[in-house]
Image: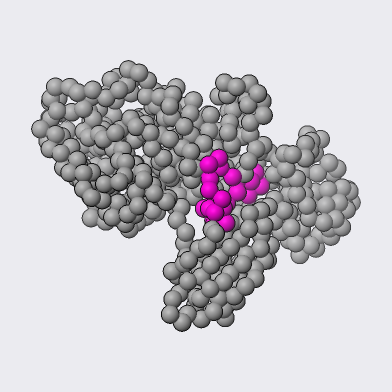
Amino acid sequence: MKLNLGIKVLIIFSLACSACFISEQKPTESLTNPQSETVFIHNSNVNLADKLTISKLPEDIELQKQISQIIDSNTFAASRVGIFVMSLKDGRVVAANEAQKLFNPASIQKLLTSMVALDKLGAEFRWKTQILAEQNIENGTLNGDLVLYGQGSPDFDDSGIDNLVNQLKTRGLKRVTGKIIGDESYFKGDKIGDGWTWNELQWYYGAEASALTFNENQANLSLQNGKPKVSDDFVTVKGEAKSVQDIEAVGVKRELGENEVYVWGNANSIDARISVSHSALWASKKLKEKLEKAGIAVEGEAAKSDWKDNTNREKFGELANVESKTLAEIIKKMNKDSVNLYAELILRTLGKRFGDEAPNENMKVNKLRGDDSAGASVIVKWIRDNKLANDETQIRDGSGLSRLNLVSSETFGRALVFANQSKFAESFKNSLPIAGVDGTMRGRLKSSSEKIIAKTGSMSFVNSISGYINSNKSETFVFSIIVNNQTKNSEVITAIDEIVSKLL
């Protein structure tokens, strides 16, 4: 979720039942001669309804001592550290530190979003984007509006529009007398997350979650002879960057709800991704442009529609459609690269389809809430139903960008155990970054390459990591480490990786 600039940048303005508490136990005997397992596939039979116990095995006590020494270092002097480590071999808690305390988890929140989606929607689920119209095509003419209707597809892009245009040409469409309407009304509610900070919204990782998302709702910003340039003319740009004299520092500003970017300062190059607002209008303009380029005349203008317009599309028939990649593929990209937008669209899809299963206690709120809020309730209900968290857990978005999420490291550990034993285990594990190899783990724990798969999380004052590790003792651990109130980012990441390395 970090800002991706190719220069130094100065940015201005810019959830466990009461019987599930950890307790101590007598030393547990180790399993003898365990067979080696396929990487990260461990046939664990850990019962999450059982009381969790902290191991008193000598080697585990020594491990906890080593981890405590790191936690007590100056690096974490002003921070809060939540740690939970469990063996999938026998369910013993190998290490814990404030494991049941609530923390802001940052992007490891996507692990919970992934699990709920895979469990309830299925790995083969696909989103559909449709072309709708109230009238049929007659003699090559469509009398009325042509509607581009989004249903939350995360990967709808230019190639999707090209596909739709080709389908319309095959149907003999030559003229549209009405408007081209980008309809994002499928989702009700807010397009940004509850608890997001306003200055995150101009960057790609703060992109709005529209039911008609287009090109991931982002555009590239660069410099050409000092003049700022954006990859799509739907976004306008002004200002300039002067040549670097002594300090390279550049400011980038996009006002809330606007698609005009202002650039100032000193820089020789910029490589940044800017979020784009009003994606439904962007998509409709692009569709109109491609229709006309394909020789299909459009008499009306490009326009947009959302849930506040109370538009009824029930009488509209389908003229064409495209489907997204499978949910498993979408989640793989989401977790490997930590794509917030994908998580937010999945959250709203869960709210739209399963919100009635997770009603709010306040009936007034329940009647008025959006699909974003309903989706968060679906996730909370799922983790409680599966005995993964207690009533104190707070989830407000799908991506982890919200400052209002509060989840314990034990909850993430329990969730990883559940996922390991689930029908979706393979799809879930395949989505996690591999240490030293890919995704957000490409540059971390390289010496432990392919022994660790984990999702990382990072935003201001928060660092986290949760996943699976194949230890050198022929057992697999689930682990979750969350650090809040940290102000020494690079030092904290190094210390976190040192703790993870102790598990090998």
Task: Give the percent coordinates (x, y) of residue 61.
Answer: 14, 34
Q: Quadrant of the C terminus?
A: top left
Membership of 120 in magenta stretch: no
User: From this viewpoint, is residue 473 visible?
Assistant: no
Give above or below for 133 relative to 378: below
Q: Is residue 26 visible?
A: yes
Task: Specify whether residue 211 is painted magenta.
Answer: yes
Q: Quadrant of residue 297?
A: bottom right
Above or below 352: residue 53: above
Residue 16 lies left or right of residue 68; in this view the side is right
Magenta stretch: dominant SS? loop
Residue 36 at x, y percent in the picture:
20, 38
Question: What stretch of residues is rendered in magenta?
Answer: 192-213
Closest to the observer, 281 or 395: 395
Q: Residue at x 67, y 66 (%)?
A: 236
Instruction: Identify which residue is drawn at 28% across, 20% down.
Output: 51
Instruction: Report the front residue among 417 and 273.
Output: 273
From the viewer's perspective, tell me whether residue 116 is left or right of residue 494.
Answer: right
Report the residue at 28% width, 55% height from top. 491
In the rendered image, residue 426, in percent from the top left (x then y), is placed at 39, 38
